[in-house]
Every structure is written in structure tokens, then in C-alpha cells.
Image (cartoon, rainbow, N blue to C red):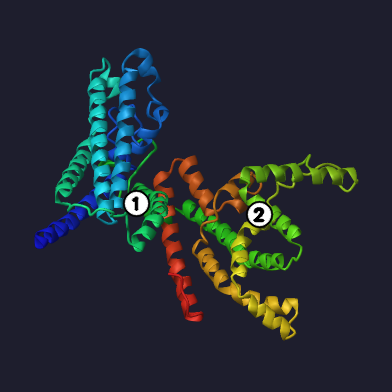
Amino acid sequence: MSSTKSRKEVLTDKLYYPIRIAILLSVVFLFIPNLNPARICGMINKNMSLFTSGISYSTLTAEFGRAFRKGWVDEASMQLLFGGAMAMCLGIVGFGISGCMSLGNLKFKKVGNIIGTIGCVIELAGMGGIYMAYTQVAQTTKPGKVEPIFPSGLWLILIITVLILVVSIIQMFLFPKLKKGTKFEMPTKFRLFLMLMPFLALVAVFAYLPLWGWRYAFFDYKVGDTISMKNFVGFKWFTELFENPATVRDIVRVLKNTLAMSGLGIATSWLPMAFAIFLSEIKNVKFRRFVQTFTTVPNFISWVLVYSIAFCIFSTDGFVSSILVNLGIWKEGVNMLMSGDHVWLKMLGWGLWKGIGWSAIIYIAAISGIDQQLYEAATVDGAGRFQRMWHITVPGLIPTFCVLLLMSIANILSNGMDQYLVFENATNQNAIMVLDLYVYKLGIGKGAIPLSTVIGMVKSIVSVTLLFAANGVSKLIRGESIV
């Protein structure tokens, strides 16, 4: 009997591998627009995922105003579609909970299987609702306007759901009976993994899933077109990047600005560390907290508001200009923002004002981790305040500084876009145009999506290369690495 039970346990454990893969796929499909089973007609945005379809009715029906008024589509059909999409989202949430609970003991697994089975039922009900909505939309009097489409992704998700349902039911029969008093237990390594998983999911959705957009670099794509082999051009845009003289001139100019501003940022990257050291030396706790709060708050102000502040101070009728005119130093007001002189230093200054307090937080945390006995011993040996800072605090912060420096070097081509977009004007355009802003204007402004995608790809590859190069140099010099 014990051998039979052992075989059942082995079989149930093996069955968890396909079910976990199926759950993972269903979660991924939740965010892929091409597999959205709720896209039952051409009036629904083709870039909408099942997740968006199930949480936002207004987004789902954004293009249906005229169709509702003319009676081409019944609003009840779209409400049914929205309900079906929402049910499918809830079912996939049940899958995810079931997959997480499968990492625990037998009691966890049994409860997880029940939740997974319920999730499958909800998922199938949602699919039924979507299919009913499709049949109603397909009966429209204006098929040319509505463009009914049977969602091909529905079959794929149906297969995955049926697989999860069948395996869950089989496992319920294979599970041995629970002993009385059995508690929910899970190994520590799995608990830690589940705590980390939401952050991994965010990274996957916002950092790796957008890489799917790199495919635009290989097509002659224009906004509103579809991607197919008809507009496939291979490496045309890669060669265009280096063969077109105008593009090469723009890239050289933009790279000069980008490297200059990033270089200034790296050259002044020690300022947050110095600020944190001097801040920690303030003995008056209330004053120290005030300074830290006052210097940290600007980080949470958007660059649009920062520009508004700059405009109020440095515009023609601004605070500084008005004072200088009233004192007779200037005859008339001058708009100091409308100038192409020293743009790099101006951007550096605004960046430091906005971010130095926030950047110092990590150094303040590192200072609190330094052994206080070192300071006491140095004081006994006669070391002064600056000697303690130089010989104890600074060496204790060097590892943190090196890690942040490596990250800065890796992101040397990524200055961000917001700051330069709001401060840009006709007089400083040539000096303020950084790579991220150039890609934005090229892709969104001019509609050159493929070329801007190529530039973004090259930037990512260069950044990864610089990260590993800087890491190698750090390992060679300091004997430590972060990668």
C-alpha cells in the first residue's frame, strides 16, 4: 500500500510540471494583444490585451459610439463581452494562485487544486460569454462597418484551460488523504520566491515584454499599418542608420550631447555621497531632518512643474529679471531660458537640484550600517571629525559608490527625456537634443517607427556592453563585481 501511495505522489509531482507551464503561458497570454480572445470585431483596438479588455469597459468600447447609435451593435453584446473578458481575467488569477500554492505541502496543494478548478470553471464561463457576444456581433446589419472577427486566441486559451482542468481533477483523485491536524506549510525558499515573484513579474512586463516591439526594426512600418511579410525589409533600417549622411550627422550631434551630459553626471556622481556625509554630521536632529526633507521633495516634482518654477524665476517677467530691471542693472527684462549658452551646465544644475537629496538616501542608509565602534576607536586615538569622515565614512561608502558608478556607466546613453523635452526651445535645440529625446521626436513626431526602433536597439546593446566592460574593470581593479 505504501508503494502505491508513493507512486501516486510521484505521479502528482510530475503532473505539476505541465500544469505550471500552462499557468505561466496563460498569465503571459493575458498581456499579448495578438492573442486577445475579446477582440471579436475590427472596431476593437488591435493593440488591446485581454487584461485591458477585462478591466476597462470604456477602453474596450471606445470606437463603438456610432455603432451603438446606429444600432449596428447592441450595447448588451459589448457588456457581455466585457463580462466574459473580466471572468477570464479572474480565472487566470485563480490559475496563478493555484500554481503558487502547488509549491507548498499536501494541504496547500489540495486547496490550490480546488482554487485552480474553480478558476477553470470561471475561465470557461468567460469564454462562453465571449463566444455568445461574438455570435451576436456577427449578426450585425453592417458587417463591413463592424468587421466581425472570430478570435483565434480563444482556441489556444481553451486548450490550456481544459489541460489545467483535466490535470487538476486527476490530481484530486491521486492525492492521499490528509492527516488530522495537518497545517499549511511551505519551504522557506519557495516563500521567498513568491515574495520576489511580483517584482519579477513587473520587470518582465515593463522591461522584457516591450522587447517584442523590436520587430518593427525589420519592417517598413507606418503608423496604422499591419506587420506582414509584404513589408518585411530585413536590415534595411540598420544600413540606413549608417549610410544616410543626414541621419549620421544627427546621430553624431545627439551622441555628443548625450555623452557630454552623462559625462558631467558621472563626474559629479560623488556629490550625493558628499552631501550624505555632511548631512550625517549635523548634530541637530530637527535641522538635519528639515534639510533632508527639503532636498528630497524636489525628486517627487515632475519636470513640467520644475520648468514652471524655472519660468517664474528666469523668464522675461520672472523674479530675477524683474529685480535686475528694478535695480537698474538691466534696461529691460531678459528671458534667460531662451538661450543656447551653457545648456549642458544648466541641465546638470537642474538635475542636481532635483535629485541630489534623493540620491543621498542610499548613502545615508550605508552610513547607518558602518560599525560605530570604529568611530569611537578613532576618537580615542585622537582623530578629528574630518579625519573620521575621510578614513572611516568614505571607505565604508566606496563599495556603494562603485556599484552606482557602474550603473551610471551602463546607462551613459540613457539621460531620460522629460527634462530635456520641457526645457527645449528654438535657441537651445541643437545643444539639448539627447538620444532619448531624439528617438521620441523621430518615432512619435515624424512617424519613423522602424528607424527609431533601430536606434533604441543599438542603445540597449551598447548599454549592456558598457555594463559588462565596467564590471570587468571593477573586478580587475577592486577584485569585486556586481554581475
Q: Residue at x 61, y 61 (%)?
A: 361
Q: Residue furthest front?
A: 180
* Residue at which label 1 appears: 236
Q: Residue at x 29, y 32 (%)?
A: 38
Q: Nearer the viewer, residue 65 or 86?
A: 86
Q: Is residue 414 above or below residue 58?
A: below
Q: Nearer the viewer, residue 355 or 321?
A: 355
Instruction: Say which amino acid is labelled 1.
Output: Lys
Image check: 145 left or right of 471?
Answer: left
Instruction: Say which amino acid is labelled 2.
Output: Thr
Residue 130 picture quarter = top left
The numbered disc on residue 296 is 2
Mark 2 Cα-neighbour bin, 10 Å: few <14, some 14–19, many ≥20: many
**Circle 2 — which element?**
helix
Q: Position of residue 187 (x, y in %)?
A: 33, 62
Q: Position of residue 170 (x, y in %)?
A: 14, 47
Mark 1 Cα-neighbour bin, 10 Å: few <14, some 14–19, many ≥20: some
